[in-house]
Structures are given as C-alpha cells and as structure tokens.
Image (cartoon, grey):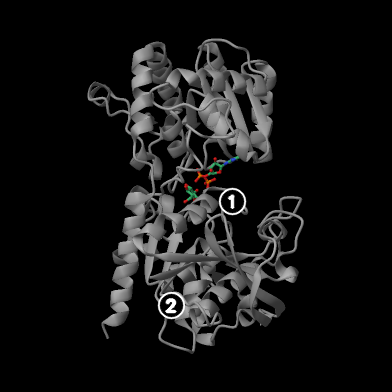
Amino acid sequence: MKVLSVASEVFPLIKTGGLADVAGALPIALAPLGISMRTVMPGYPIVRDRIGKAREIAVIPDLLGKPARLLFTEHAGLELYVIDCPDLFDREGGPYVDTAGKDYIDNWQRFAALSRVAADLANGIDPAWAPDIVHGHDWQAGLAPVYLKYSEVGPHTPSVLTIHNIAFQGQFSAQIFPALGLPPAAFAVDGVEYYGDIGYLKGGLRTAWAITTVSPTYAEEILEPQFGMGLEGLIGERVHDLIGIVNGIDDDVWNPEKDRHIAAGYNGVNLARRAENRAALEKRFGLAATDGPIFCVVSRLTWQKGIDLVIDVADEIVAHGGKLAVLGSGDPLLEEGMRAAAARHPGRVAIVFGYDEPLSHLMQAGSDAILIPSRFEPCGLTQLYGLRYGCVPIVGRTGGLSDTIIDANGAALAARVATGIQFSPVDRHGLSQALRRAFRLFEDGPAWASIQKTAMKSDVSWQTSARQYASLYKTLINRVAVP
Ligand code: ADP
Ligand code: GLC
C-alpha cells in the first residue's frame, strides 16, 4: 500500500512542534506493516540545505501562479517529495512566520501550493509513484482533500486529514478564491466556504474521507464548543468518520540508554545514573545543587500550555525546596513573567529562551518531573518523552494527557501502575495541589522510584497506533473497491 503524507514540518528536517515529530516518525513505524509512506513538504531553505542533491521529478510552471519544481530524495529513512518554489518558500524566518514573528501574508498561497502538489501526486505527476491514500496534517494540508474532491480526473484518491490542533484553522479572505484554481462549486458549505471566508481546515474536514485526531479524548472533546473552536458542529456531522489515534514516539531518537545529547545513559535498572544528568542540568541552568525535586518545562510559552499557571506557582515550588528549569519561547508577556520569576529566585528558577533540540533531551534526563498544565492538549509528546526518561509527568487532565498518564492515586500506587500525576480543573489551585502531591511522593524515595520505573515501562511506541492507521487506510481502500 502506498500512502502520501502531506506535512508542513517534518523532523529531522524542520520542526516547530509535535507535528514534525509525528510526520517524521509515522512513515518509519508504518514500513514494517507493508505500507510505503512518502511525504510531500515545502522546500524551505533549511530543508534544501539538509537534503543536498535531489532528483527532479517534474517541472510545475504554474503552481498557483509561481514557477516550481518537484524534487525527490531519501533522507534519514524518509522518502520525500520536496517542493522547490523559491517565490513561496525561500524566506529568512520560520516555516510560518517572518523574523519578527508575524505570519507571512501569503501563507494562503504557500500552503495551498503544498496541497495542490499533493493532489497532483495522487493524479499522477510522478509517473513512477502514485499513492493509494493521501494523508494530510493540520490546516496546512487542509486543501489536499478539497483539490482531490474537485479534481477533474478520476477516480478520486481517498483522503485522511489529521487534526493536530483545531485552534489553528487557516482562515483567509474570500478574495483569494479565484487564485486557488478550484471550480466555483467549491466555494460552498460543502467545500471551503466558512462564514463568508475561506477555511482550509474547514474545507479539509468537510471533504476528507476520514478524519483523525491525535488522541481518543481529544476526538470527543472537539465535539464540544469549548474545544471545537467553532468547528464542533461540522465535526459532529462527521463523527462517524472520526477516530482518535494516540501519537507514539520515535524510541530511537528518544532513548535514555543511548541518547547522545545527555550526560549519562541509563535505564530502569540503573536509574541512579540519572544523578549525573541532574548535575549537568543544574550546571547548564545555573541552579544550586540542592536536594529537592527539579521540575522542568519544555514548551511553547502560550496560554494553551498553561504557562501562566507555572509562573503563578514558581514561588511555591521554591518555598517547598524545589527548583524550576524552563526551556521555551513564545508569548512576550509569559516570557516576561518567567524572567521575573527567575530574577526573584536566582539558583532556584532558571530559563533558557529559544528552541534547543539537544537541551530538550537533557531536560527529560536530568529533571525529576515535567510540568504540562495544558488547558487543551490534542496529544502532547513531552509527557511521552517524560515517561520514557523517568521524568515524572505532572499534567492537566485533558486530551492526550488524560489518555497517556495514569494518575498516582492511592489505588494506582498500590497496584504499581501509576506513571505520573494528573490534575483537574486545570487552574492555579489544581496545579498547586498536584505539586503538593509531587513533593510528598518525591520525599518518599521508593514511591517516586516506583513511579519512574513504571513510567519507563509504559508503551509509548508507535506500534499500536501505526496498526490503527493501517487499518483505517485499508477500510478506505476497500470503500473504493466497492462500487
Ligand atoms: P506542540 O506541538 O503543541 O507544541 P507537543 O508536546 O506535541 O506540543 O510537541 C512539542 C515538541 O516540541 C516536543 O518534541 C518538544 O520536546 C519540542 N519543544 C517544544 N519547545 C521546545 C524548545 N524550546 N526547544 C526544543 N524543543 C522544544
Ligand atoms: C499539536 C498539538 C499537540 C500534539 C502535536 C502532534 O501541536 O498541540 O498536542 O502532540 O500536534 O500531534
């Protein structure tokens, strides 16, 4: 079976968040199941640099008005179609925003181009390879199912759209419609029209053959206005085509036994070696070498992630003898709040601003617990890395966080199945209570070690989830076969 993944970021080529990890790991997890997944992605400068020489598959003289080429290469175990279109992708900033952090004004065109090429691949632009299924990720690939539905050539390739975060919807003015190259009929409730504007995610959710999201709980949550962000009605209409499949992690990239980014490798048996990583982390952050637990945060600093709550409890962490190490960047007000907390507590609270992949590994290996007080979390990956590294996740009870962490309540502790701490409601009081429980458990050394060991044994691999994707793909292909 051949599947085309359509993604705006793919680890290890370019990453701003969990989507890249998933897009980079899923093809590798599907291979043993007999699924050949290729990926189409934009040729950002860093991607062009990293892949080096690539084979030209096609020249596209008019990709939404821009000249482009479609390249193919293999990189880090991935088979990649890269869209070389300097007018759209040769930029100095990130994949979505400029150096000042502002969305590129032509994002509508940049990601319509990505989806357009995905549909072209389904329709045979590469004479040597065409997918049986097109699987897009998030709003950036939202138009792929739309282009497929409205393409003149048939039969139409089945499509899957995965929602990684419904908060980002790709909504643009109706004025762009003529430039998208879709027939007039597509500007309708059944197509891309969304309250008089154009919605990329909306169009994708309307037209994809199947919809997935990255955890079962989030699949239920997005049926409610609080989480559906305006799309709950549409999701409700398509609930029979919706399935939640929890993310796994790449356990080669995230393996505490042979992680080259940490100070000392370890496993569940020689957990004591974590102490070396703890010391390395203290040094890196300028934290005092005191006994209490180190809590870490590795995150975009945003409201979604509940970073304001972490700022609220920083004093409390220090008062109880704990320390806080933060790696991240984002909302300037939250950055400011973190900076102030660090200034109040030198040697106890420290922050590294920016994005640092190697350091994110040391955070998991050297901290005792990772704080993830997200207000909503479609899946979340850092709690899964925490499980694997024995860095106890302390999480809000929402989305994928509730599906992947077993709370250390009395019964779970007695049965030795606890893997972390969950709290609800996700507010300052809830987090504060959770921290108090964490301090108590940490002081009881064996109880803490037992949670760590159970956590490290949890299955965070892609195996089960890859099988679920495979069976979804098969169902869709069978639907084609039945007239
Ligand atoms: P989201 O995709 O919503 O940001 P996830 O938990 O799914 O949240 O994924 C975040 C990914 O980005 C993880 O791999 C995490 O380790 C990584 N990450 C987040 N912030 C940073 C940072 N400042 N430096 C390095 N890695 C980071
Ligand atoms: C999104 C979500 C996050 C999820 C990631 C990968 O960025 O915010 O919860 O883990 O996608 O699916």
Of residues 272 and 186, which is closer to you in this image?
A: 272
Under circle 2, the secondary element is loop
336 vs 198: above or below: above
> On the image, numbered disc 1 is attached to which residue?
12
Q: Which mark is residue 190?
A: 2
Q: Amino acid at mark 1?
A: Pro
Between disc 1 and disc 2, the foreground one is 1
- What is the quadrant of residue 278 in the picture? top right
For label 1, count other residues whose C-alpha is less than 10 Å away and answer few (under 14), some (14-19) or many (20+). Answer: some
Residue 238 seen by the camera: no
* Residue at 48% over, 78% down: 122
Q: Position of residue 159 (x, y in %)?
A: 42, 72
Residue 400 seen by the camera: yes
For label 2, count other residues whose C-alpha is less than 10 Å away and answer few (under 14), some (14-19) or many (20+). Answer: some
Under circle 1, the secondary element is loop
Of residues 200 and 324, which is closer to you in this image?
A: 324
* Residue at 65% over, 40% down: 355
Q: Position of residue 36 (x, y in %)?
A: 43, 66
- What is the quadrant of residue 251 in the picture? top left
112 vs 362: above or below: below
Q: Amino acid at mark 2?
A: Asp
Sequence order check: which comes first, mark 1 or mark 2? 1
Answer with left or right where residue 124 lies relative to residue 93. Answer: left
